[in-house]
Amino acid sequence: LGPTVCVGEILVEIVATTIGDGFRTAQPLVGPYPSGAPAIFIDQCGRLGGRAAMIGAVGDDDFGQLNLDRLRADGVDVSAVAVDRQFPTGSAFVRYRASGARDFVYNIATSAASRFGWSDAVEALVRRAGHIHVMGTALSMPSAAAVIARAVEIIKARGGTLSVDPNLRKELQLDVGVERQFAELVAKADLLLPSGDELERAAGVEGEAAALEKLFALGVAEIVLKRGANGATCFSRDGSRLDAAAFVVTEVDPTGAGDCFGGAYVACRRLGMGAEQALTYAAAAGARNVTVRGPMEGAGTRAELDAFIAATPRR
Ligand code: ATP
């Protein structure tokens, strides 16, 4: 079966280099960096040599070109990324607080990525795709959510697989429609990649064991739980459990760790690796990415991740 596809937001990120509250005292800012959770995921997937393709839209501007250039350079098929002549590429300004929390200013509500739809190029890609990865964040954009629903149906019907990263913003109360689509996707997923309390939220029950049991009963085959600097654990429906110790790194910019982790895990599994080896590459991809400023600047090739694994101690 064909490439891994990911649907959703593509934007640029501009990051404050000083830690503090808000932007009025934040100088200097650096960027623009290519970004968007689905874009980071698919970039890491392509960079690792997995067949990868993106569905979304950018504006007919430099920020859009920056993203297209990066994705292409990392081996991602962008034939289904529309170039919108009316609406610009979105942007996000980010500053970290001392607590690790982030302040954002978003310009995405009227961006190209918030209004793309089904097209002949999307149809052609989906009809040859072998796997689709869904980011929870993309479901809150109605246009992306509609494309995702249709793409999942076609890809699953042709024997392809589905992975879901719940990454639902904890602070947001989701619409009923988004909650329903999310629950339907979880029930169809082969692989889930939650972090923190997203596991329980995805299952709709409290407690790790109860959540795992419920999700496996729904048909999920594998659940990889991300735990930031504490590493990750892969639970399989057959009852097996694999723990991956985190690599010891100095965190410069945590944005994109989970997306790089997911992109590496899916790429490695689809390249035929077992869960243990894929988990090592995924943990390395997540850890390496936090050492570099910019959401996808630390995504690694196989050679870069091999070098990182050889040189970096684990907890
Ligand atoms: P985000 O939403 O910020 O992209 P996430 O919550 O989805 O992230 P994390 O658990 O933060 O995902 O990170 C994914 C994986 O990357 C972790 O399971 C771990 O293996 C690796 N990782 C992340 N942060 C660190 C860190 N500071 N040190 C070492 N490894 C890390």
Image: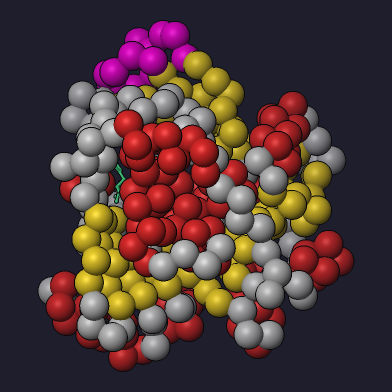
Figure quadrant of the C terminus? top left
Residue 65 seen in the figure: yes
Quarter of the image where one finds residue 15: top left
Q: Please say whether residue 114 is one of the residues in the magenta stretch.
A: no
Give the main secondary structure, helix, strand or loop, of the magenta stretch.
loop
Q: Residue 155, image x and y in percent?
A: 66, 78
Residue sitting at 31 percent across and 91 percent down?
217
Magenta span: 17-29
- Pick the residue in front: 288 or 277: 277
Task: Ligand 1: give its quadrant.
Answer: top left
Figure quadrant of the N terminus? bottom right
Residue 295 seen in the figure: no
- Pick the residue in front: 56 or 217: 217
Q: Please say whether residue 22 is one of the residues in the magenta stretch.
A: yes
| Side (left or right) of 243 relative to 275 | left
| Side (left or right) of 283 relative to 30 | left
Give above or below for 19 relative to 157: above
- Pick the residue in front: 263 or 8: 263
Give above or below for 127 relative to 108: below
Q: Residue 74, image x and y in percent?
A: 66, 41
| Side (left or right) of 140 relative to 308 | right
| Side (left or right) of 227 relative to 63 | left
Q: Residue 34, image x and y in percent?
A: 59, 33
Residue sitting at 66 percent across and 58 percent down?
51
Give above or below for 239 relative to 118: below
Residue sitting at 51 percent across and 30 percent down?
297
Q: Residue 90, image x and y in percent?
A: 62, 37
